[in-house]
Image (spheres, helix red, strand yellow):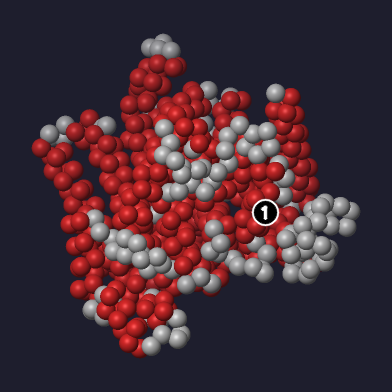
Amino acid sequence: MSHILKMIAQRLALGLVTLFVVSLIIALGTELLPGDFAQERLGQSATPETVAALRAQLGLDQPFHIRYLTWLRDIVTSGDFGVSLANGNPVTEQISERLRYTLWLAFYAAAISVPLSLTLGILAALFRNSFFDRFANASALTSISFPEFFVAYILIFLLAGAGGVFPSMVNFRTDPTFSEYLYRAFLPAITLTLVVTAHMMRMTRAAIINLLASPYIEMARLKGIKPMRVVLRHALPNALAPIINVIALNLAYLITGVVVVEVVFVYPGLGQLMVDSVRVRDMPVVQGVALIFAAAYVLLNLTADVLATLSNPRLVHKR
Amino acid sequence: MLGFLTGLFWVAVVVIAALAAGWVFRTAAIAVAPKKVAKALRTAPLTASFGMLMILVYIVVAIFAPLIAPFGETEVVSVRNAAWDDQFLLGTDNLGRDLLSRLIYAARNTVGIAFVTTALAFIVGSVLGLLAATIGGWFDQIVSRAVDVLMAIPALIFVLLLLTIVGQSIINMILVIALIDSTRVYRLARAVAMNIVVMDYVEAARLRGEGLWRLITREILPNAMAPLVAEFGLRFCFVFLTISALSFLGLGIQPPLADWGQMVKEFSGLITFGIITPLLPAGCIALLTVSVNFVVDWQLHRASGLKE
């Protein structure tokens, strides 16, 4: 087992290095900004003294490496992302509540889409080239190509609006109970599900079909084992690694790709915050959100790597 | 329940009509095309034929937009928010511009910009990828590690971050998206070229004293072309969707230039009243990406030689 732990430690270290470089790129962003932040914020009529005062207050008069290290230290030690340029509130405060809602939405969508896409993928592999398979494939390809807002507005058109059942805008002004949440966030979750399910289903199907051509599967078939059992007991365990990878990629997509869906449904998540901040070029907020997204992305890919290795006995019991 | 059944009926009608159009197009194309192309076309499934037909229609509309559109792109021709009638087939927008004309001109803007961006990403990505595979050593190491880091940040988030830094304009958007996308192209081009570089005939070409440029363009590129072309289609879809998403978020193509994503946003308020206007530009985007995907799917299937 020890080499597994060693591998996990290695991957973790690599992930940390990646995150560090990413944070460096993100921090370099402010450095490359054309013009002066303080000047831009105060406008043309500001006196040189006020501009200088604001620069000192924001720490802009320090050299880059000191600013970067302070920024990083604050984040690591106290989770402090600095102060928003647009409204002067602490960034951490703005992010933390929205992060919770974004994660909620991602989990909600994942809870529907992962079992659904695995089932559909296995069924499509089992009945490949049948009408069901062709239909599932064509609709998967179609829904992959749809932009998220198209799916979202079709759903709103069908399920919300005049005589509709579900709300087209998500409103959390009062803290929702669990069932209320499920009801209010139904449309965004279904939109995300439709977007990611197709991809996961296609990859599951491809992974299993790839394996079905191998000799040991043919052997199992010749023994007279039922097709369902061949797929579930013989093919699926070996197809786990690619499937886990795809699921992780799509979960990463769920967390980061929610931007458009959040804007459509006015869902109070991180994506919406990011878009609003990009519009007014509120750099500290954009940096903080980007860092969180990147961390989630790196972490999920890392987990996928480790899980994929663990699912392969040849790698676990390496001689 | 009845509404659902009518909906299902219309979906079926549209699908059958699309497949029929694909069949007609395929038959016509086989009759017209030279022998070699016609042979390849015979293997095309109906979905791919339909895809090719639609791509052709989009190209024609984009090129001849001023001839097809009944009114100018930014011309105010009527009262605001006019309903659909004989003169303004799809009504007018909130400034009184003809919606149909805007949709037609948007084909030119959105598809054109997406195409330029993809081409740029492709040139940068594949040149770097082929170079890295051919030269190897430190060059390969440096570029590959840089690409690894760039790919560790999710694409749309990175685009948003870079757009905050450089400011919003069409040129900036093209450059930023091309940069991010070229990393994906680089990965593929390098992986494909890596398998070719180790072949004997490349070794022989090296020994013959062929220069780097000739080695890449004459020996490696012809064999790496098929997967790269299929990838071009996929990348185009991705870039096109990213630009549309940005425009939808109000960060991409700006008015008065017509753009589908931005039009969806403009009309989005109407959808809750059961008016389908916002679905028209969104549908234009969806139809093009579906078509490209159908064609790419067919090409990938052909290239992989899968017979299942």
Q: Quadrant of residue A40?
A: bottom left
Disc 1 secondary structure class: helix
Determine the image quadrant of residue A237.
top left
Is the residue marked by circle 1 packed among few (<14), some (14-19), or many (20+) residues within 10 Å?
Answer: some
What residue did someone put label 1 on? Answer: B267
Where residue B155 sits: x, y (%)?
43, 56
In the rendered view, does A298 fall on the left or right side of B67? left
Q: Position of residue A296 (x, y in %)?
A: 32, 48
Q: Position of residue A160 (x, y in %)?
A: 62, 37
Nearer to me, A177 or A6 = A177
- Judged from this view, the residue extending furthest toward the left is A2
Identify the residue at horizontal 51%, vertical 70% (top origin). Answer: B168
Which chain is mark 1 on? B
The kind of residue tagged 1 is: Phe
Instruction: List x then y, in percent, for residue B61.
Output: 74, 60
Q: Is residue B48 visible?
A: no
State which quadrant residue B91 falls in.
bottom right
Tell me: residue B300, above or below residue B68. Answer: above
* A191 in relation to B296, above or below: above
